[in-house]
Image (spheres, rainbow, N blue to C red):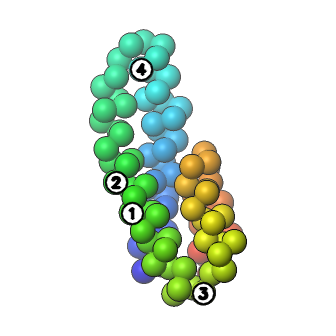
Amino acid sequence: MKNTFRIVSVLEGVSYLLLLFIATPIKYLLGIDTYVKMLGMPHGILFIGYVILAFMLKSELEWKSKTTLTVLLASIIPFGTFYIDKKYLRD
């Protein structure tokens, strides 16, 4: 489960960065919304998977509520999921 969460975490982080720093500027600067449409759905699915897996790992890894909240908040901060991977998920 932990390895699955790590994979989803990295993919969610990459999709968020692409959406935030590539697709959104292209949409608003060039008026092309294709990339936002293309990246939005996969990112949303990965985000939901990240949240569900975080709650599932809470009991498996015996995270305290503060740790769980930190893991969840990291999903909305750019580069946050990479920090979580390094701090809480690597052996």
- Asked if 36 appears above or below 57 in the picture, the reply is above
Q: Sequence-wise, which precedes: disc 2 or disc 4?
A: 4
Mark 4–mark 1 contact, CB under 8 Å? Answer: no
Residue underneath mark 4: 27
Residue underneath mark 3: 62
For marks 1 and 2, give the CA distance.
6 Å
Q: Sequence-wise, which precedes: disc 4 or disc 1?
A: 4
Marks 4, 3: nearer the viewer: 3
- Disc 3 residue type (three-letter): Glu
Task: Compare residues 8 and 63 and report the one nearer the observer.
Answer: 63
Q: Residue at x 54, y 80 (%)?
A: 58
Report if residue 76 is visible in the image. Answer: yes
Estimate how packed mark 1 is, as few (under 14), some (14 to 19) or many (20 or more) residues with alpha carbons within 10 Å. Answer: some
Residue underneath mark 2: 45
For marks 2 and 4, give the CA distance.
21 Å
For marks 4 and 1, give the CA distance.
26 Å
Q: Residue at x 44, y 46 (%)?
A: 15
Q: Is residue 17 left or right of residue 36?
A: right
Q: Sequence-wise, which precedes: disc 2 or disc 3?
A: 2
| Residue furthest front as drawn | 65
For marks 4 and 3, give the CA distance.
42 Å
- Disc 2 residue type (three-letter): Ile
Q: Is residue 16 left or right of residue 32?
A: right
Residue underneath mark 1: 49
